[in-house]
């Protein structure tokens, strides 16, 4: 049993062969954190945390005589509010008397085989009860009659624990939840580096690492989406930990809306990590008997470096977060017309592009923005999901039938959550967007956000989409979202419930996606939000791949894909070969380097094929065939980061399976009289042999001595791909 409770010691132990997570009920009341890390086979200490009287600056609970115990010092699992712990807490509630003091103590627990889904929310899951075990711990404030149930699930074969919280009002009065976070983990040390992924549009997930500092450090989104500015992820690593060795703790929030992840280092060099829905613009009124379910947090521990952490996320998300027909299917090579035509296209242009793409070996043709309403720029027509007859005189089905006749699959771009003021939908329903009545509404990208917290709005958009999808045989949908929330309000919602709107929006979106993906199981859905504005674990549950960034420059993408791989496997990252000079930053990059970086994910093409040289067309055809031949390895193999491109010198990845692997290498900015780089591989069989570079070398030699990579490269932004095969 991977979860045990020792009633004598009042200790919970969650464990498998790789990790242990130990908690203890102290003073017969308080649930405290004891240990989280590498597996401990037998833990015999009791109440081992030092009892030191901190005098009046760390108060002692009133009902206890033990003056050496203070909530302000101890490591807790569910810290309350205004109860002597001056650090941030898991919960904040306003009670009928207008006060907020909350003190949560142990009431009961259950250990259950398996893992239940959280209603209305994306979650990791299991296929068999034997895969995981769940612990429910019920905490209670007897004066307030607030119940908080902590849910812990540990996977049998993975170094993974998931946590969430459930808040219920058992009183006879109203209770306002002002803060309802999902997880708290307290560490007895502050000897950590903090790893995070800040960014912006076209510069998403920029890896940052720095030593943790005293006080509170907060990563958050207030955008109504997880956003480009931060990823709902944080890792705490030992200062010596790198990609290949050392300890690291990863936290990833399975949610797509406003979030907050904070680290707090107290005066005694202890670290608290809190993860959950951002209290910004959040207040959830609970009537007697009502409850609120917080989303899930995934915790991963690795003692084999950052690659070990990432591989655990990759395996979990591929196998137990993504769902549906395409979860374990190879993804098609596609061409997207966007950077070729933008809004300026007609049926003939599209068919000519499809003909040229088919000759190269492309498998999927994607029609991007501009096919609907009067959409000739980004100022109009969102919400008018009917075909533009001037561009497509034979209708959407006529175009799709012709594309299919060429032997290509067909994909279509939608932005269902948005509406343009210049649209029929807005004229018919001017109150259907997120806004505050009788208050100015900001514009973003000339569009407004439809209020998906309202069922009637979702139903109307669902009908518009199904009217197309029921009659046009579409194989792929690119779901875009290019606007974040401002002036958050919902017409018709009671004043006391307005601050529910952001979360109700996410629940509405999840409900919409659940219905849509269930109705169309044979459509491959790709998540997009102006690039990676909502590329998070919550969206993976509904869409198994995401557009990684609108920035298609190979060197920028090398960095973005490197950082994205901390959480997501390559099969979830869509990457395209695009023009040079690049449309986003103007960089000129060799064709093969653009191809190399794009082929480290799900390969796509975003090129005007008629403007390419004959030599580049020949290379493109060759690269597409090479990618198809190695696609299974790239999309389903074990992925290693070997060299960090953020130093602007080199970037290197490795893909590995039981038959061999691939090395992707880019030399970014060389120097005169440069030093030679010897690259060491990872994950090989040390006693096995591999054919590589026309040599037969042992796994131990390749991992400990390595191979020289840059002796034959000259010039900026050069790359190479090396294949190696294991000798049977």
Image (cartoon, rainbow, N blue to C red):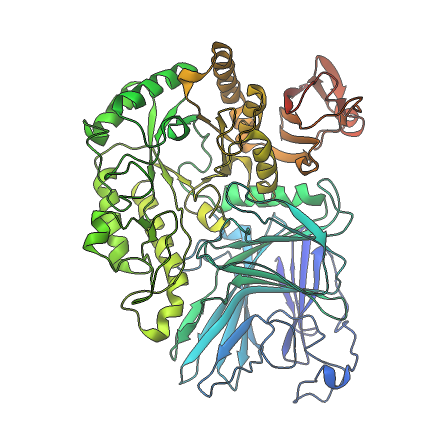
- In the picture, the quarter occupied by the N terminus is bottom right
- In the picture, the quarter occupied by the C terminus is top right
**Residue 361 visible, this angle:** no
Residue 12 relative to residue 182: left or right: right
Q: What number of labels is visible? A: 0
Seen from the viewer's position, the closer of residues 61 and 346 is: 346
Q: Tell me: residue 162, above or below residue 583.
A: below
Q: Tell me: residue 264, above or below residue 684.
A: below
Q: How far from the left and from the top, in percent, is residue 38?
A: 72, 53
Extreme residue toward the top, this view: 614
The residue depicted at 55 percent of the width and 25 percent of the height is 594
Q: Tell me: residue 305, above or below residue 57.
A: above
**Dividing the picture into quarters, in which one does residue 480 lie?**
top left
**Dividing the picture into quarters, in which one does residue 642 lie?**
top right
The residue depicted at 42 percent of the width and 53 percent of the height is 484
**Dividing the picture into quarters, in which one does residue 455 lie?**
bottom left
Q: How far from the left and from the top, in percent, is residue 391?
A: 24, 29
Residue 199 relative to residue 376: left or right: right
**Residue 308 visible, this angle:** yes
Residue 490 relative to residue 216: left or right: left
Q: How far from the left and from the top, in percent, is residue 326?
A: 42, 36
Seen from the viewer's position, the closer of residues 3 and 506 is: 506
Q: How far from the left and from the top, in percent, is residue 493?
A: 30, 69
The residue depicted at 73 percent of the width and 21 percent of the height is 710
């Amino acid at each position: 049993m991977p979860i045990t409770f020792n009633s004598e010691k009042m200790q919970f132990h969650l464990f498998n062969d790789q990790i242990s997570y130990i908690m203890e009920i102290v003073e017969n009341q308080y649930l405290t954190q004891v240990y989280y890390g590498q597996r401990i086979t037998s833990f015999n200490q009791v109440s081992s945390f030092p009892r030191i009287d901190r005098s009046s600056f760390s108060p002692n609970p009133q009902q206890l005589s033990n003056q050496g115990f203070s909530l302000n010092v101890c490591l807790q699992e569910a810290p309350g509010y205004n109860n002597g712990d001056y650090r941030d807490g898991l919960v904040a509630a306003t009670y009928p008397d207008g006060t907020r003091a909350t003190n949560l103590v142990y009431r009961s627990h259950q250990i259950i085989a398996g893992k239940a889904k959280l209603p209305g929310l994306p979650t990791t899951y299991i296929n068999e009860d034997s895969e995981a075990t769940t612990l429910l711990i019920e905490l209670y404030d007897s004066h307030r009659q607030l119940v908080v149930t902590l849910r812990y699930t540990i996977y049998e074969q993975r170094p993974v624990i998931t946590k969430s919280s459930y808040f219920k009002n058992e009183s006879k009065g109203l209770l306002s939840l002002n803060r309802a976070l999902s997880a708290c983990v307290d560490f007895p040390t502050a000897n950590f580096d903090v790893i995070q992924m800040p960014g912006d549009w076209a510069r998403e997930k920029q890896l940052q690492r720095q030593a943790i500092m005293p006080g509170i450090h907060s990563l958050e989104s207030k955008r109504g989406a997880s956003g480009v500015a931060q990823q709902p992820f944080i890792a705490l690593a030992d200062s010596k930990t790198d990609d290949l060795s050392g300890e690291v703790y990863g936290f990833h929030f399975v949610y797509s809306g406003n979030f907050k992840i904070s680290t707090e280092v107290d005066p005694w060099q202890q670290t608290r990590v809190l993860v959950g829905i951002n209290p910004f613009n959040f207040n959830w009124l609970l009537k007697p008997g009502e409850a609120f379910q917080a989303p899930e947090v995934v915790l991963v521990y690795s003692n084999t470096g950052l690659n070990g952490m990432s591989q655990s996320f990759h395996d979990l998300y591929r196998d137990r977060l993504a769902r549906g027909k395409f979860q374990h299917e190879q993804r098609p090579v596609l061409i997207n017309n966007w950077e070729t035509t933008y809004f300026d296209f007609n049926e003939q242009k599209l068919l000519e592009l499809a003909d040229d793409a088919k000759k190269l070996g492309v498998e999927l043709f994607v029609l991007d923005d501009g096919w609907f309403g009067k959409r000739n720029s980004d100022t109009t027509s969102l919400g008018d999901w009917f075909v533009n007859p001037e561009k497509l005189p034979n209708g959407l089905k006529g175009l799709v039938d012709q594309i299919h006749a060429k032997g290509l699959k067909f994909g279509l771009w939608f932005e269902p959550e948005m509406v343009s003021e210049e649209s029929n939908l807005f004229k018919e329903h001017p109150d259907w967007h997120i806004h505050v009545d009788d208050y100015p509404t900001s514009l973003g990208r000339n569009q407004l956000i439809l209020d998906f917290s309202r069922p009637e709005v979702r139903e109307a958009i669902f009908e518009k989409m199904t009217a197309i999808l029921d009659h046009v045989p579409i194989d792929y949908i690119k779901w875009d979202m290019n606007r974040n929330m401002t002036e958050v309000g919902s017409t018709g919602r009671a004043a006391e419930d307005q601050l529910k709107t952001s979360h109700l929006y996410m629940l509405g979106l999840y409900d919409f996606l659940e219905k849509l993906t269930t109705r169309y199981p044979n459509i491959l859905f790709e998540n997009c939000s102006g690039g990676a504005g909502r590329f998070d674990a919550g969206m993976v549950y509904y869409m198994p791949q995401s557009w990684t960034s609108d920035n298609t420059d190979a060197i920028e993408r090398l960095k973005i894909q490197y950082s994205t791989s901390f959480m997501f496997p390559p099969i979830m990252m869509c990457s395209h070969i695009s023009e040079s000079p690049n449309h986003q930053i103007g960089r000129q990059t060799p064709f093969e380097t653009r191809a190399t970086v794009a082929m480290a994910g799900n390969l796509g093409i975003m090129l005007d094929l008629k403007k390419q040289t004959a030599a580049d067309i020949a290379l493109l055809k060759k690269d597409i065939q090479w990618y198809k031949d190695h696609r299974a390895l790239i999309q389903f193999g074990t992925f290693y980061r070997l060299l960090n491109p953020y130093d602007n010198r080199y970037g290197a990845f490795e893909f590995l399976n039981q038959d061999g692997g691939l090395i992707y290498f880019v030399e970014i900015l060389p120097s005169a009289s440069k030093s030679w780089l010897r690259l060491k591989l990872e994950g090989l069989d040390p006693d096995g042999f591999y054919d590589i570079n026309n040599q037969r070398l042992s796994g131990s030699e390749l991992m400990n001595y390595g191979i020289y990579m840059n002796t034959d490269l000259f010039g900026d932004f050069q790359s190479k791909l090396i294949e190696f095969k294991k000798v049977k």
